[in-house]
Amino acid sequence: MAKICNQAQDWLDHHYSFGHAIALRYFSMECTGRINRDDFDPKTDTDLLAHVKECSECYAWIVENVGLELLERQKRLTEYCCPVLFGAVEEPKGGNLQLKLTPYPQRDGGHNWSLSLDSGSGEESTLIVNFCPFCGNLIQTADHSSL
Ligand SMILES: [Zn+2]
Ligand SMILES: [Zn+2]
C-alpha cells in the first residue's frame, strides 16, 4: 500500500475515529466536526482528504470501516442544508409526524419546496417553503437532480 494511503487512513482513524464522522468528512468539502482535537492540522487534513477522494484503495478502506449503508446515509445527510432537516424528512422520530419535501414548480421554471406534515389523522397540511425552517438556509436536497 502506498505510504500516503497509510498516512491518510491513520489520519481519518485518529481524528475522526467513528464511521459516521469518517463518512461525513469524506463527503464534505471541508472539515466539520472532527473527534480528536489534539495535533490537528487543517492543511494536512485538506491534503490527505484530497488524496482520499481520488484514491480507490482509500475508498475501499472507508467502505470496509464505515459500511456501505452508513456511507450512503451520511452522503444523503451532506446533501441537505442541515442535519435537522435531514432527520425530519428521512428519519422521523415523532410517531406519526412526518415531513415530506416535494418540489413545487414555479412559473419561472424554478421551484420552491412543499413541506407536508402528516399528523397521522389522514389530514395533511402543506406549506410552500423556500427556506429551511430549522437553519434558515435555502433548502437543498439531493432531489434537485430529479427535477
Ligand atoms: Zn490512498
Ligand atoms: Zn436546514
Image (tube, rainbow, N blue to C red):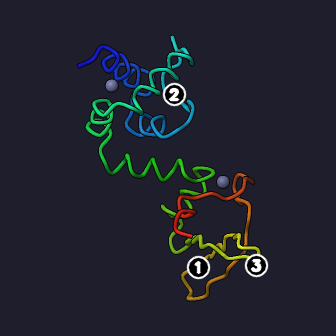
x, y percent for residue 2 = 27, 17
Foreground of the two, 96 or 102: 102
Instruction: Give left or right: position of 60 versus 135.
Output: left
Most distant residue in the bottom direction: 122
For label 2, count other residues whose C-alpha is less than 10 Å away and answer few (under 14), some (14-19) or many (20+): some
Amino acid type, callout 1: Ser
Write down the quadrant of residue 16 in the picture: top left
* Residue 93 seen in render: no
Mark nearest the camera among 1 and 2 is 2
Q: Which mark is residue 107?
A: 3
x, y percent for residue 47 = 49, 20
Name which of mark 1 and mark 2 comes first in the sequence: 2
x, y percent for residue 36 = 48, 21
Q: Is residue 92 above or below residue 13?
A: below
Instruction: Write the residue at 65% across / 72% down.
Output: 115
For label 3, count other residues whose C-alpha is less than 10 Å away and answer few (under 14), some (14-19) or many (20+): few
For label 1, count other residues whose C-alpha is less than 10 Å away and answer few (under 14), some (14-19) or many (20+): some
Instruction: Give left or right: position of 26 versus 32.
Output: left
Residue highlighted by disc 1: 119
Instruction: Write the residue at 45% across / 47% down.
Output: 74
Most distant residue in the top direction: 39
Mark nearest the camera among 2 and 3 is 3
Report whether the residue tagged 2 is closer than 8 Å to ligand 1: no
User: Where, quadrant-wise, is the C terminus in this rendering?
Assistant: bottom right
Foreground of the two, 45 or 124: 45
Instruction: Write the residue at 32% across / 35% down.
Output: 59
Q: Which mark is residue 34?
A: 2
Amino acid type, callout 2: Arg
